[in-house]
Image (cartoon, rainbow, N blue to C red):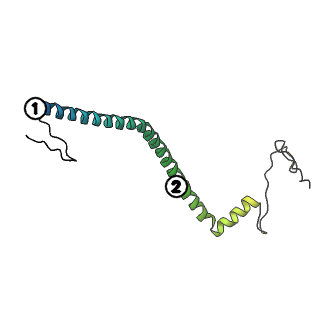
Amino acid sequence: MTSSRVVLGQRPTRNLTAAAKHRRIAREIVIKVLVNLGIIGGGLVALSQLLPYYFSQQEKLAALETAEKAAQTRVEQLKTELHQDRQPQAIERIAQEEANLIRPDQRRIVWVKPGVSAHSQPDSQPNPQPAQP
């Protein structure tokens, strides 16, 4: 009597034919290929969703870089003007232009068109009204 012992934790061995082994290996390969194709398909779908977003962000970046260059040019221009306005000659010129201040040794000259009274105001500007408390 031959006794076949089954040891716990071990699977009983089966005697598979060569053709069955090949079918099993082929089935395993097909499953692996299908899983990999599914992963690739998911990656392609995700990529197709992200590409339009990427291109729109690239356009926004290009627009921002252009705006930055324009702003940088303006900043340099303003720095130059600020440096020029801090010169002593510029301070006097700015006071004359913006506050209508003149030096005591100067006289104000107002050019008037012929036929227009020197004390009248043009029709296009309304008379300023004093502020009411």
- Residue 50, label in figure: none
Left or right for 120, reference 85: right
Q: Position of residue 105 (x, y in %)?
A: 77, 69
Q: Residue at x 10, y 32 (%)?
A: 17
Q: Amino acid at mark 1?
A: Thr
Left or right for 79, reference 119: left
Left or right for 78, reference 24: right
SS under mark 1: loop
Q: Residue at x 76, y 61 (%)?
A: 99
Q: Amino acid at mark 2?
A: Gln
Out of 26 and 14, give the one closest to the viewer. 14
Q: Position of residue 57 (x, y in %)?
A: 46, 43
Q: Position of residue 88 (x, y in %)?
A: 65, 69
For the N terminus, the quadrant is top left
Badges 1 and 2: C-beta atoms under 8 Å apart?
A: no
Q: CA distance from mark 1 to mark 2?
A: 79 Å
Q: Residue at x 44, y 43 (%)?
A: 58
Mark 1 crowd level (few <14, some 14–19, many ≥20, 10 Å Cα) = few
Q: Position of residue 127 (x, y in %)?
A: 87, 47
* Residue most extreme to the front: 1
Label whose residue precedes the other's in the sequence (1 or 2): 1
Residue marked by disc 1:
17
SS under mark 2: helix
- Residue 72, label in figure: 2
Q: Residue at x 46, y 39 (%)?
A: 56
Left or right for 56, reference 6: right
Mark 2 crowd level (few <14, some 14–19, many ≥20, 10 Å Cα) = few
Out of 45 and 22, give the one closest to the viewer. 22
